[in-house]
Image: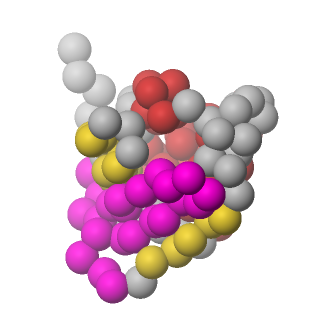
Amino acid sequence: MCIKRSPLENYVLLLDLVLKMRDKPFKPKTFLKKIRPFCKTEHSNFRMLHIRVRGAKLGVTIQIKKDCFVVCQNRLIHEFIFYGNPFEFSSKVLLTKLLKHNLLTA
């Protein structure tokens, strides 16, 4: 059975998830599993992640490089680069940065 939620509800639930997360090292597969109920996700070999809050029109593409995350909002030119070792980063820190910069809202 599928639950129909508005983008705002999914966004609020994602914020709640961030508050409950602990700071553990970033692992793409685990990260996608945690946010999947609230976000539509795709990945290319866990180096390129496509994330969109369910019901929203815009999403982000996250490219995982050796020393940073490169985040580009779909259909926009701007890129956001978050430096730091992606494998020492935590999923919580990455999600907090995405939400802080309003990259997951349309």
Q: Position of residue 91 (x, y in %)?
A: 63, 40
Q: Is residue 106 above or below residue 91?
A: below
**Going 48% across and 65% down the picture, which residue do you hit?**
70
Q: Residue furthest bottom?
A: 77
Report the coloring of the rendering. Answer: secondary structure
**Going 53% across and 39% down the picture, which residue do you hit?**
13
**Going 45% across and 27% down the picture, which residue do you hit?**
29
Q: How many marks?
A: 0
Residue 24 counted in the magenta span: no
Q: Position of residue 22 (x, y in %)?
A: 76, 30
Q: Residue furthest right?
A: 23
Residue 68 counted in the magenta span: yes
Q: Is residue 16 above or below residue 65?
A: above
Q: Position of residue 56 (x, y in %)?
A: 30, 58
Q: Residue furthest top?
A: 1
Occupied quadrant, residue 89: top right
Closer to the camera, 5 or 78? 78
Q: Is residue 79 left or right of residue 3?
A: right
The quarter in which the C terminus is drawn is bottom left
Closer to the camera, 41 or 25? 25
Q: Is residue 96 left or right of residue 22?
A: left
Q: Is residue 53 above or below residue 38?
A: below
Is residue 5 visible in the rendered image? The answer is no
Q: Is residue 26 left or right of residue 1?
A: right
Is residue 95 visible in the rendered image? The answer is yes
Occupied quadrant, residue 1: top left
Q: Position of residue 18 (x, y in %)?
A: 66, 41
Q: Magenta segment, which residues?
A: 55-77
Q: Residue furthest front?
A: 66
Q: Is residue 76 above or below residue 36?
A: below
**Going 50% across and 55% down the picture, which residue do you hit?**
65
